[in-house]
Structures are given as C-alpha cells and as structure tokens.
Amino acid sequence: MSQFSSALLLRTKTIAIRDVVCSGECRHKSDEECAHKTSLVYPYRGVFMRHVGRNDTVAEANQVLFFNASQGYRISHPVEGGDACLDLAIDEALLAELAPKEQLQSSIPVSFHRQRRRIDPRAQALVALLRHGLHRGAAETLEAETLALTLVRRSLGEQTSHGAAASVGRQKLVDRAKLVLSCDLSRRWTLSDVAAEVGVSPVYLTQVFQQVEATPLYRYQLRLRLARALDLLGRYEDLTALGLDLGFSSHSHFASSFRQAFGQTPAEFQRAARLRA
C-alpha cells in the first residue's frame, strides 16, 4: 500500500479540493517538499508535524495549516496511525479577497504570515459536510463551492479563529501536550498524567496551554474527540458505541457535547450530511 494518496474531489475555476491520506509509516522527517500553490489544509484524522525551517507545527483537527506556494517543508509522524486532511486550493484572486490583509505577506503569489490558525467547531463541521458530501456525490458543485468559501472565511475570521502567539519554549510545551492527547483519544487522561508526560507541573501546564491556545486543555481534548466523531459518523449505525469508543461516559454525554459544539445531535448531523436515510 502506498504511504500517500490524494483523491481529487472537486475542481472548478474557483477551487480545487483534495482528500489527502498518509499512512504515516515514516516517523522521521521526510525529504523537503514544496507546494506549487498556496493552499489551506484541514487535518480531520490523526496527527503529524510540519517543519518549516526551524518552525515546527503540530497538525491535528483543531487547526488549519497554510501551505504557502514555493515554501519548503518537511513532514514527520511522531504518533502512529497516519493522518488524513482536506486540502483546499483557492483561486489566488479570491483568496486575496477572502483573507484579511494583516494575515498575508506582501508578496506574490499570495502567502500567509503564520503557519497555522486554530479553527472553531462550526468550521470543523463544514469540513465534514464538504468531505462527506463530495465523497458520496451528494453535494452539487455550487453547494460545494459555497461551503468551501464559507469554511475559508470562517477559518480566517478573527472571531472564529485564533492565531497562536507564544515563545518558542511555551509553544513546544503545548505541542508536546497536543501529541500526548492525540496518541489516544479514547483515554480518560488526568491532568497529572498529561503533565507527567510533558515534564512540567499540572499548574504550569494549564496556565501555559490556556495562554497559548486561548482554550483550556480539557476543552481542547474534547474538540479532538468531537472532530474524530465527525470523521466516523458515516461508519457507525450505533451512535452509543461511537461515543463510548471515543471515551465519552455515555450516549447522553456524547450527544450533549456534540450538540453544544455543532448545534445538532450526531443523528441530526448524519441526516444533514446524508450519511443515513
């Protein structure tokens, strides 16, 4: 089996959308690669690291990553299981229109200052709707293009995304905590367990994580679990089993958390995404 696959889901004058899956067999840094066109990459399963010069970024389902045209990068997989991402390459003029000017470099082609931004649950839901709809042929072209542009606008909006800013040391600490959480989404981690894994006190970990990510550690883990639920909803008929497999204490806990994040229950999302009749 190839380690890397890319399926083109949609190509129009406005946007190209690909579903990119990597088995993650190589744990070390890859050879340097280079994006031919600036794209927004939304991880929806698994985790990987992207290395741009001395800048290392954890890529998981709470983030959108910016792959700038002509910028070299390397990929590694510190956690087993590989990853899957939705890759959106938008017409350059439209991307320049969508993106706030302060987020862009003053260069051509269009490129972003930051390596990533944190996205909110509604953006995660749009990723799932777009991917499921295109894979099943249920989303018409106009609908898919509209959903994609809405997703990008939401991902870049100051009210619905967060550009992390921190010292290198604090960012590395937070990244280590993210990798710990990502390696076992169903485990009911305690704060002391995570702190011990990253080598700091629980108090310091909670303070630094909140400062860097603008969200508490427990909520970050919850959103990782819910993002995985969005990915798996098409494979489960028994939603109670899905919730328990992801570490929720009961179906009601899973359903209420899902509704609070995405505005509808898992069953309602299945129907809206046309995953179930």
Image (spheres, grey):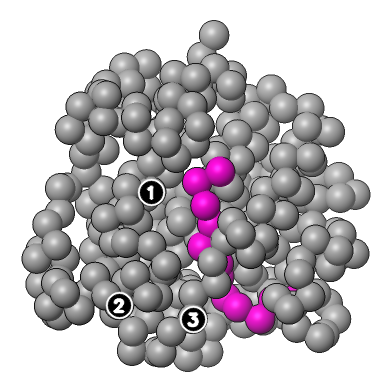
Alpha carbons under labels 1 and 3: distance apart: 20 Å
Q: Which mark is residue 165?
A: 3
Q: Nearer the viewer, residue 210 or 149?
A: 210
Badge 3, how many Cα within 10 Å: few under 14, some, many 20+? few
Badge 1, how many Cα within 10 Å: few under 14, some, many 20+? some
The three-letter amino acid code for the residue at tag 1 is Arg
Numbered disc 2: secondary structure: helix
The three-letter amino acid code for the residue at tag 2 is Val
Depth check, mark 2 against mark 1: the one in front is 2
Q: In the rendered image, which quarter is residue 245 located in?
A: top left
Alpha carbons under labels 2 and 1: distance apart: 18 Å
Q: Which residues are magenta?
A: 111-122
Q: In the rendered image, which quarter is residue 236 located in?
A: top left
Alpha carbons under labels 3 and 2: distance apart: 11 Å
Q: Position of residue 204 (x, y in %)?
A: 20, 79
Up the image or down, 171 lies above or below 229; here it is: below
Q: Residue at point 67% right, 32% down?
A: 134
Numbered disc 3: secondary structure: loop
Q: Residue at point 67% right, 48% down?
A: 151
Residue pointed to by mark 1: 223
Which quadrant of the figure contains the C terminus? top right
* Figure disc tally: 3
Tell me if I can see residue 38 in this picture.
Answer: yes
Q: Position of residue 224 (x, y in %)?
A: 37, 50
Up the image or down, 111 lies above or below 121; here it is: below
Upstream in sequence: badge 3 or badge 2: 3
Q: Which mark is residue 208?
A: 2
